Amino acid sequence: MKQPGTCARCGRQLTDGTRLPVIGLIGPECLRHVAPLAAFIKSVDGVCATEGDQQSVKTVHHLIRVVSSMGFTYRLTDTTRSGKRAKCLTLTGISRKQLKGVIKSYEERREEFARELQAAAELNALQAPKADAANADGMAA
Ligand SMILES: [Zn+2]
C-alpha cells in the first residue's frame, strides 16, 4: 500500500504515501485530515437507485447533487438488481476544486449530509446481495 509520489492534499513529495480511493495518494501527516472525507466516499460509493424504489431514487438524486456541488466527478452505471433496473453511483475523482477545497466543503456541510448519509448506509445494507423478494409493484423509474 505504501508508495512514492506527491501528496494529493499538500503537494509534498512522499516516499510512503497511502493510496485512497477517489482521493489519490496521501502522506502520513495528511491522512487524519482526509479520513472523514474518505469515510464519506466509502458510504456514498456504490449506492444504487432501483426502479420502483422511490426512496433509493430520491437518495441517489440528492447524493449526486451533493457530490457534484462538492467537486467530485462521478458516473452512473446501469445494472439489474433483483430483476429490476438500477443505476449505481460511482465516484471517479475530484474536479474543479482542489482536494483541500473538497475537504473544507465536506467539513462545512457534513451536518447537512447526515440524513442522506444515513439513507445511503441503509440502502447499502438493504442492497447487499439478497434473494429476489416478491416486491410490491412499483412505478417504473
Ligand atoms: Zn500531505
Image (cartoon, rainbow, N blue to C red):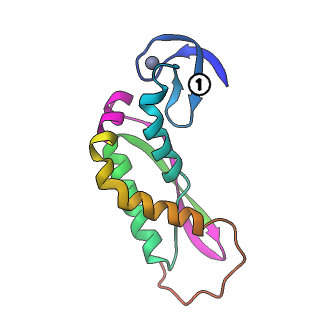
- The percent coordinates of residue 117 (x first, y second) are 42, 57
Of residue 139 and residue 3, the one placed in the foreground of this image is 3
> What's the magenta region?
80-105
Residue at (56, 37) in percent of width and height: 21
Q: In this view, does 130 lie to the left or right of 54?
A: right
Res 137 quadrant in image: bottom right
Q: In this view, does 116 lie to the left or right of 52?
A: left
Residue at (30, 52) in percent of width and height: 111
Give the quarter the ligand 1 occupies: top left
Res 129 quadrant in image: bottom right
- The percent coordinates of residue 108 (x first, y second) are 27, 42
Q: The disc labelled 1 sits on which kind of residue?
A: Thr
> Residue tagged by mark 1?
18
Few, some or many C-alpha atoms within 10 Å of disc 1 (few <14, some 14-19, many ≥20)?
some
Query: Relative to residue 71, is residue 90 depicted above or below?
Result: below
In the image as oriented, which residue stretches furthest toward the right? 131
Residue 83 shown in magenta: yes
- The percent coordinates of residue 59 (x first, y second) are 41, 65
Residue at (53, 59) in percent of width and height: 47
Mark 1: is the Cβ under 8 angstroms from ligand 1? no
Secondary element under disc 1, as helix, strand or loop, is: strand
Whether residue 48 is visible to the viewer of this picture, yes or no, is: no
- How many numbered badges does the structure rendering display? 1
Query: Relative to residue 87, is residue 73 depicted above or below?
Result: above
Query: Relative to residue 105, is residue 141 depicted above or below?
Result: below
Of residue 34 and residue 12, the one placed in the foreground of this image is 34
Residue 29 shown in magenta: no
Q: In this view, does 130 lie to the left or right of 43?
A: right
| Quarter of the image with the N terminus in it | top right
Whether residue 78 is visible to the viewer of this picture, yes or no, is: yes
Residue at (49, 27) in percent of width and height: 31
